[in-house]
Image (cartoon, grey):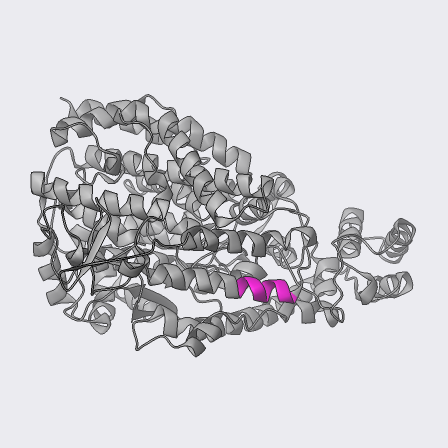
Amino acid sequence: MGPTIFDINSFSIYGKPPSLKLNFIGIKIVTFFLAILIMLTGCFDNGGKSHKNKPEISEKTISEVIAQLKRAHPNCPPERIERGVNHTASIWWAADGTDKDFADFSNKYFVSDENQLKILFNKANKHIETLYGHFNWMTLKLQEPVHLKFGEILPIDEMFSGFNPGAHLQDDLYKNKIAFVIALNFPFYSLHEKNELGKAWSREEWAYARLGDFFTSRIPAELNQHYAKISSGADLYISQYNIYAGKLLTEEGKSLFRDDMVLLSHWNLRDELKANYPLGEQGLEKQQMIYQVMKRIIDQSIPLSVINNPKQNWAPYSNSITENNQPVEYFPEPNTRYLQIIKNFRALKAMDEYSPLNTYIRRNFEGNMEISQPDVENLFVKFLESETLKEVGQLISNRLGRPLEPFDIWYDGFKARSNINEDVLSQKTRNLYPDASGFKKDMPNILLKLGFSKTRANEICDKISVDPARGSGHAWGAAMVGMQSHLRTRIPDNGMDYKGYNIAIHELGHNVEQTISMYNVDYYALTGVPNTAFTEALAFIFQKRDLELLGIQDNNPQYQAFRTLDLIWSTYEIMGVSLLDMRVWKWLYENPDANESQLKDKVIEIATDIWNNYYAPVYGTKDQPILAIYSHMVSYPLYLSAYAYGNIIEFQLEEYLSQKSFASEIDRIYQLGRLTPNHWMQKAVGADIDIEPLLKAANLAITQVNK
């Protein structure tokens, strides 16, 4: 699921975001410190007084310093002097010194000689790895009690998991002027400039530019710390949102699910829904009940007492509960779901005035994804309006032998596993992987099956740990050489079931990316991938090979056509959810004082509008709120678009890899590091990121399947 340096999953493709190595910004899994530190932000502390992000150095002083440096360094490119001085002045505040202090500092620390500049870069690069790497490790360890399946979570665990050990790091780097030395000599380039100038940059020039991304604006440490606490609370809320499926009852009092089945919302609810497609009418009844549960969660009419509670039976249609065969009075969940979103919004909005990217929306898209939000939304709308989706929808309806239902956004029938009883698969995976150590031991064999040499497979897997997760699972990347990446997946006491295995293969894809892009990239400043979509793409590619890794082959001549249809249908699902996520955040910025009740109503309204505009024409059913069920919206703000982009990238990578050596190309491609998205894709597969190849392939697949 997934920050690059740090960065902050699921039976199907979309699960909890990884704690990948993102784009110096990021998200999940709640690598709070990383997600903020690298969010093109910084911090400061001035005796409790905060300053808005505005220059404190006069234009006269800036001009004089530039002129002085040009005279002192006549052989240095004037543009580098101008860019360095202007950028440093933009983040120099009164607390940092007077205009004279600024001038003296600039004259003393500007490095014109290219050899000396390279030495400065190498030293700064190494020291930043040391700092960020160890803070990433501390964050990982502090959150283990809430992330891993070890013992009871105590209040002290929650407190430590919400503590950000690196909240004051950039504050200190500004105070001792290290940040200004880097800003002066490795200035920041805008996204537009990177896209244009980067075409001619060497690897070293790209690394210099990425080092400049570390210090672009300054956010008070207390705001970083506050967000860490809020984010941790939201993650804990979601990680314990279990529904005891064995306690769900029909109106006739019948239980449809195994008594011991526990489903985490929304991931496992969706996964169980997927698993029931092969069961015909019996499966349909289960799916309809799960959707009723989802709607209760969305509108918060779910009884508070049935969440994470194995003692009460719940009939979700009538919304009645019993305990020991006696009716029980209950209270609905008090809009807690939407309160978490509001808390995240307010914590992130508080940072706006300290960043040139002056909304979290801009920081997430222009800063993190390095694609503008309007461009992302326009691309998604273009896809959602495609007539091809109606043809795919009709094909699915024909295969099901019934009209589409809203939950068929998760139709799983194009996959080979859709015709295999999941219990059979789970028995196989439990035998193979009774615990985390079993999966860890087998990882080199998995990579061997994917074409990696024995030496390379062992080299990669030696840098990955496997842990049992409380939630659905995630991947947490290393942030320095010598640190391991961590693969987390849910492992019941009786062994890893198929859902857990499927997630584990997804997370292994993340871990392989994290390892290659950490240990095999030439400059630390370039470690990682352009954004989370690129690590999601590799996770998807691994995940879709899960059955063949179990020795189950699909000899269907239409195999590739079905894989394309599966990808376009899952892209259809996630693009609508991503559109909801973006539009909800835009509404929040327009209504910053909204309470949780107002937000709930608006989320349902927007979800319904998106459904009616882009899904009702395919499904034939209007006014459905299903897109609002995603847990990502609650605890991983604006992460969902990375999945949708990941699907596009996945398709282009798969198309390219089909004619190449899988393992060697994966090794080459993920050593490209953190270029901007299109530069990365051009060097990876020789083409820009584009939705048209997927749509074209889908049309061909429909023709092949309908023959």
Query: 634 and 224: which one is in front?
Result: 634
Left or right of 187, for residue 16: left
Res 482 seen here: no
Tally of marks? 0
Q: Quadrant of residue 304?
A: bottom left
What predominant SS class does the magenta segment belong to? helix
The residue shown at (76%, 49%) is 83
The residue shown at (69%, 54%) is 354
Q: Quadrant of the N terminus?
A: bottom left
Q: Position of residue 472 (x, y in %)?
A: 30, 59
Q: Quadrant of the C terminus?
A: top left
Left or right of 91, for residue 568: left
Query: 109 and 410: which one is in front?
Result: 410
Q: Quadrant of residue 470?
A: bottom left
Vertical arrangement, residue 322 with respect to residue 565, above or below = below
Q: Quadrant of residue 322?
A: bottom left
Res 179 seen here: yes
The segment highlighted magenta reads 221-228
The residue shown at (8%, 39%) is 280
Q: Position of residue 574 (x, y in %)?
A: 36, 40
Vertical arrangement, residue 131 with respect to residue 621, above or below = below
Instruction: Tell me, yes or no, whether the highlighted magenta stretch contains residue 423.
Output: no
Q: Position of residue 507 (x, y in %)?
A: 32, 58
Q: Position of residue 360 (x, y in %)?
A: 58, 48
Query: 291 and 301: which one is in front?
Result: 301
Instruction: Tell me, yes or no, whether the highlighted magenta stretch contains residue 222.
Output: yes
Left or right of 153, for residue 550: left
